Structure formats: structure tokens, C-alpha cells
Image: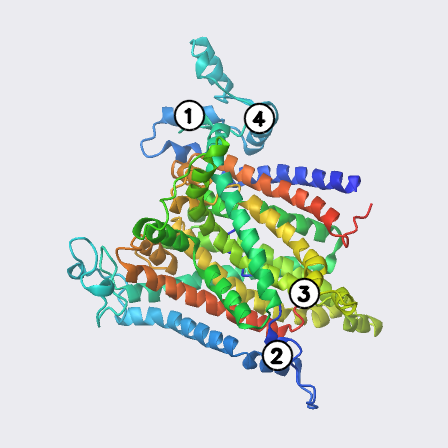
Amino acid sequence: MLAFIIRRILVGFAMIVVMIFVVFALFFANGNPAINQCGKYCTPEKLDEITGLLGYDKSIPEQFTAFSAGLVVGRDFPVNDEYRAALIENGYENRIIHCAAPCLGYSQSDQKTVNQLLVKAAGPTLSLAIVSFLIWIFFGVLIGVIAAINKGRWLDRVVVGSTLVVYALPVFVIGTFFLQYVAIKWQLYPYPRFEPLKEPADILPWLTGILLPALTLALFFMAAYVRYTRAFVLESMSEDYIRTARSKGLPERTVLFKHGLRSALTPLVTLAGLDFASLLAGAIITESVFNYQGMGALAVKANNNHDLPVLIGLVIVGAAAVIVMNIIVDILYAYIDPRVRVTK
Amino acid sequence: MKLNPPLPSTGATASTMGTEPRNVVLSRSPRQLAWARFTRDKKTVVAAVIVGIYVLLAIAAPILVALGVLNPYDNNQDLIANDSLPIGAFGGISWDHPFGVEPGLGRDTLSRIWFGLTFSFAIAIIGSFFAMLLGVVFGIIAGLTGGWVDYLIGRLIDLTLAFPQTLMLLALSSTVLGILTTVFFIPEGDLARAAYVILVLAVFGWVGVARVIRGQVLSIREREYIDAAKLIGASPMRRWFREVLPNLWAPILVQGTLILPAYISTEAALAYLNVSVQQPTPTLGNVLQDAVRYPVADFTYFIIPVLVLVILVVAFNLLGDGLRDALDPKGSR
């Protein structure tokens, strides 16, 4: 088991390294990104300044190495040694920005390190991810199990039919409906505004502010999870050991909860873990519908400003979250599913 | 987050579970059996008809535009009031404009949605084609070779899935659009943007297909008739090309039917993020993107494209589900 965990972690680490390299290769494929960022009224001086500040004049492997080193020991901006030396010589030492490890870069347009921007945006995004995750797991599994028990009856048909419709509705349409009708026109619910959760007393306003966007996001996943759960439960309820349990006279409730659900819900752990992790880079569409200042909004803003370090930071954090979750889920799976025999 | 993965199955439906008539002695080919199962399921037949109508509409649209029956580009300022909303009830519905007109410019909504259908279909079909191609090739290679090739493809799949899709396609759009126009000489504008959407669909879409196909290859490889072929001395090439591959057309067809509606939805999501084909060229996505600006002020204009999209996606998914049940009654997922 220990060997399995170590091997899994090593593979995950290798994947993160490869992932970061792929990100660099992709984003630098079209030449110096400073040209984009410099914008319409670009002067050669400004272009040189951005290039030197962020070290865009180096080759892709060199930038990749510098970035990776920054993750471990931190970095100083401007990256260009001569620029830094010139700043110190002229007494502008305070203009050198130190970005502590794990350094993800520096945003020239925001004059802040990427880490600072990400930490600021993490609140709304994490809140949204957690609340919507709880909603979709709870209701998705519940409704899925109910549909499976009533297979073929009208309740099942209604549930399966509605998952099709909900799935077909774009997230931005659901979000717009909640915001414009439920909150603004009908005034059924207070206008959703993010309230940070700093102390236990904040929990009610926090939840009130997050519920509509979380529900918007959760509905899409719920449609999928109802279908997954229904399929998994039906599959496990047709196994031989269920027949054994029934034939030895166990009540149907025990058969379902003790024997059926356990094996039916194990595969959901994998799916749920990965789907949750995929939200950590921000739910861009939901956040922009509700004007939430999370990772998604940060991404949209960075994209409009051609702020490459922020985009790279977001992609890397998001992808690393999924890779790490993959490892956690694999290890969890080996523990909870007796059928998974980890060899060696 | 992942942009619109194909809809997961709900497991076998009642109509296909053990309802085979037992007293029929006539032998029927697997294809006849599948056809019988397919036509017995009314829901699937209705879905197939709706999908057929949509496809015909999408094919007819360019012809009707050329003939001047549909006018997706002409402004009708005379139909727009001072508050930039259409004159008249229900978004300005009239005999000339059965779905009303667009707020602001007054273009005919029916024409825009109808012609938009053509562009959305074109993007989704080409995108699915490439995703299927990559997915089938990688899936077959992984399933047949096994060993370290399978392992590498598996890690490539994990890596592709790890990238935050929405973020990637937003962040990469300017870089990749630049490459498409300067390196591949695709003209700037709609064509380059459509190419970008197709590229994104293919690059992130092949993964799901590859997983399904790999699973299918692995399960077919272990069936008795493959052992039988081996026993009578069939060469490996013969076993792969004559025994394994022909059995893959069913899952390929089913996957194709399921990813197409997912890609039509994805195009809509991309349009919302301003990444897809831009106005004035209509797509279902950019019509919707404009429509969600007037959810309350012009409800007709908001709800009609939503309904068009929902009916399309639901019908396609029902058809895909029905096909899966008909072609693969045991439901190997």
C-alpha cells in the first residue's frame, strides 16, 4: 500500500512538471507575449520594460526553469539582472518586488504578485465550489437513488426527463433567470452578493449571498449525478450478492442501504473528487453572470488585459488541484473499495 | 470546470430489459434485432424525427438565405421603439417576423436562429468528427497494445482532463488565433474563430471518446469468438481488423450522437465568453449571448433561442440513449 501511495505521488509530481511545461509551450508559442500586453499605444521602451520585468526575452526552457525555481525558492522582479542592478544603483531598491515561494509570477497590470491576486480571489471561488458541491452531491445522489428504486414508474420518468432538460439548459441561461427573475423582478430572494466568511457569525449572510450562484452551478452537475447514481444503483442492485441478501430474508431497506448503495456509490467518489477539483480554477461563466470577484472573474480580467502571468498561474493552480485530487481519490478508492486490490 | 461533457447514461431502461419475445423461432440478425428495439421505443423514434427536422432545417437555411426568404443580416429600425425594444407585443411578433425581431437592430429573430443553427451544426459536426477521430485512434491503440503504450495514453488522458477547460480556451484564444492566422493562413475573423472552437472541441473532447473505445476494445478482446478465431489460427492482423474493429461501430455511433449535442451547448458557452464566431454571423451561441441581455425586457427574444437549443439537445440525447439501448442492450459502459 505504501509503495502504491509513493508511486502515485511520484507520478502525480511528474505530471505537474509536464503540465507546467506544456502550459509554457502553449502560451509562448506565438512569440513574445509582452507585445500583446503592451497594448495599442506601445512604445519600444514600454515593450522593453515589460519584457525585462517578466523575463520574456529568455527562451521557453529558460523561463520554465526560472518559473519552477520560483515555485521552490521564490523570485525577484524585474527578472532581468541588469534592470535590478540599475534599480539598486539609482536607489530604487523598494521597486524590486520579492515574490516568496511558491511564487507564481507577477502581474504587471495589477502591480501585485500573482499569489496575492489568487489569494484574494480564492474566497468567492472556494465558497461557491463548496456550497454547490454539497448541494449537487446531496440532491443528486438522493434523487438518483429515488429514481432507481422507482425504475420505470412515472416518478422515475419525470426525474430522468428533467435531468435531460436541466442538462440542456446553458449555465448562463439558468444564472440569468435566477438573477433577473428570482432576485430582481420577483424579489423572491435577496440580490446575491458575496459576503466573506471571517467569523462564525457571518455564516448566514455568507450563505444567503452564495446560494443562488451555487445553485446555478449545482443544477448542471446535479443532472449528471442523478443519472450516474441511478445507473450505478441499478447496476449494483442486479448483482448476485443482492439476490443472496434478498433470499436470506433481509428487509428491502437493509438490502438497499447496506448492500446496494455501498458498492453503487464508490465510483461516485472518483467523479465527485475530480469535479470538485475542476471548480477550483473558478467557475468562469457562473462568476461572470453573478459578477462574483473570484478566480473566474480574475481570469476574464487577466485575459482582457493580456496579463499572461495571472493566466498561467490560474491554469497551473487549477490543473495541479485536479492532479492532486486524482491522487487523493485513487488512494481513498483503494481503502473503501474492497474489490480494488492494490498489488505490490 | 468542464464544459458540457456528454450526458451520462442512466442505466438500462425498462423497454430493453428482458423484453425479448421468447417464443419467436425466426432467427434475426443482430442488425434486425437492434432495429426492432430501436423502433419499439417510441420516445427514441420521436427524438429521431425531431433531430431529422433540425438537420433538414440546418441544411435548408443557407439556400433560403440565398433566395432571400431568410434575412439574418438586414436591420429593421422601423420596428424598434425608442427604448430599443421591438414595437408590439411578444417581441414584435408579426406575419413577417414569426419569432419577432431583435432588440436594438431589429433583425429577424427566426432568420438569425435558423441560419445560426447551420453554423452551430457545422462547428459541432466538424468538432465531433475530429474528437471522434482522435479518440477512436487513441482508444484502439491503447486497448489493443496494452502495456506501456496504454499507460502513456492513460496519463495523457489524465493530463488533458486536468487542465481547466473553460479557462484554457479563454486564455489561449488570442495566442492560438494568432497562430491560426499567421502560421496556417486561415483568414482572420469568423473562419479563424470557428477553427479555434473546433480545435478546442477536438483537443478536449477526444479524451472521453478514447476512454469509451478503449474499454470496448478491452472487453471485445476477451470475448469467446476472439479465442475461437485464435484457435483456428487467424493471424493477429485478421483478428484485429476482421473480428475486433467491426464491432466498434456501435459505440462509435452512440458516442458521436452523444457528443454532438454537448458540443452545440459548448459552442453556446464559448459564445457567452466571446470566444466563438462573432456577430453579425449568427450561431445559436451568439444569438443566445445577445438574448440573455434582455431576459425581462424582451422575454420572447430570451426564451425562443433557449427553447430551440433545449429541444435540440434533449432530442439528440434521447436519440443517443435510444441508440445505445438498441445497439448494446447489455449496456457495457
Label 2 marks which chain's residue?
B
Closer to the eye: label 2 or 3: 3
Task: Name the residue beneath numbered marker 1.
Answer: A111
Task: Name the residue beneath numbered marker 4.
Answer: A70
Whole-percent x, y for residue B185 in the image: 42, 50
Is label 3 in a helix, a strand or a loop?
A: helix
Estimate the spatial distance between the alpha carbons at disc 4 and disc 1, rounded to whole Å: 18 Å
Whole-percent x, y for residue B29 in the image: 66, 83
Q: Earlier in the sequence, mark 4 or mark 1?
A: 4
Estimate the spatial distance between the alpha carbons at disc 3 and disc 4, rounded to whole Å: 49 Å
Label 3 marks which chain's residue?
A
Q: Is the Cβ of the residue at disc 3 closer than 8 Å to that at disc 4?
A: no
Is label 4 in a helix, a strand or a loop?
A: helix
Whole-percent x, y for residue A153 in the image: 56, 72
Badge 4 amino acid? Gly
Q: Residues within 10 Å of mark 4 (few under 14, many from 20)?
A: some
Task: Name the residue beneath numbered marker 3.
Answer: A235
Q: Residues within 10 Å of mark 1 (few under 14, many from 20)?
A: few
Q: Residues within 10 Å of mark 3 (few under 14, many from 20)?
A: some
